[in-house]
Image (cartoon, grey):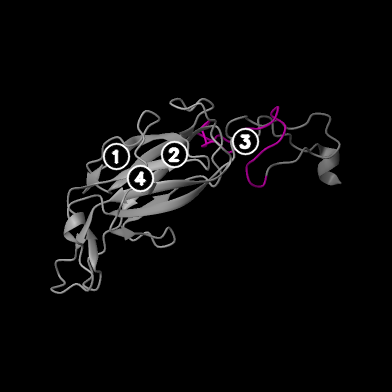
Amino acid sequence: MSFPPEFSSTATYANRYDLDEIDVFLEGDSSNPMFFNISGLTENLSFGKHYFYLSTLNPSFPNNQYQLRQGSKILFEFKSINNVILRSNVSTIDQQSGIVTCFVEVLKDPLRTFKEVGDGQGTLTVVGSIQDNPELSHPPNPVTEKFIGAMNYRCIFPINIRKNLLNADSPFVLQTEHKKSTGLGQFSFVKASIPSPKHSNLGITYHPENGNPNNPNKPTGDESSS
């Protein structure tokens, strides 16, 4: 993908970039990634597909020495602790917000290798191309000629793989509409519901949709006098 966001596919099980091994000008810190933001990724990756969001950060205040280069390609790659590439890709793109929905998938058969995906701490590596901030006339540590226009910035985020962990998959939406309903028409969810009159042989039933009483019993003469 590129910056501004005109994103394309990234690493899948068929492609191996070894982004954690390429030579870069600047190495980022996952606690302060500077140019990339990862959100929504589950804490533990089990078997299955997990979605997350990738967005770019490009502060333009004058004291920032570097900026993400216009038109920079952005690649990301997941690796397990035993160096197996996890299948990952871009799912959807929001051009206006610059937020990209991506996924990573932990497969029982990762293909292209006889290894199984190992449990433990793996990595999510994101790389892009940065340039000197044009607002600084004399940057203290300018991008060297070797790295100008290249994939020269990298940030590695730790991930945790627990393949057989229960309930670790991304959530599935099962219901989008909620209704108020009564159990067997005997209990009302409306405020100040009407109880059955004392000494009445016939209880009050309620409408299953709106909770209103179907047969509100009036007290008998004896009940009213008591």
* Residue range corresponding to the magenta coloring: 165-192
Which element is circle 2 on? strand
Residue bearing the label numbered 4: 19
Residue bearing the label numbered 2: 51
Residue bearing the label numbered 1: 93
In the image shown, does 54 or 34 lie closer to the viewer? 34
Which element is circle 3 on? loop
Which one is earlier in the sequence, the residue at label 3 or at label 1?
A: 1
Residue 15 inside the magenta-drawn segment? no
Residue 118, compared with residue 138, is above or below; it is: above
Few, some or many residues within 10 Å of mark 2 (<14, 14–19, 20+) = many
The chief SS type of the magenta part is loop
In the image shown, does 19 or 23 lie closer to the viewer? 23
Q: Is residue 129 visible?
A: yes
Which label sits on residue 211? 3
Residue 104, image quadrant: top left
Measured as percent of width and height from the top left, residue 172 is found at: 51, 33
Which one is earlier in the sequence, the residue at label 2 or at label 3?
A: 2
Which one is earlier in the sequence, the residue at label 4 or at label 3?
A: 4
For the point 40% across and 50% down, which residue is it?
Answer: 38
Judge left or right: residue 167 versus residue 59: right
Few, some or many residues within 10 Å of mark 4 (<14, 14–19, 20+) = many
For the point 62% across and 34% down, which residue is it?
Answer: 164
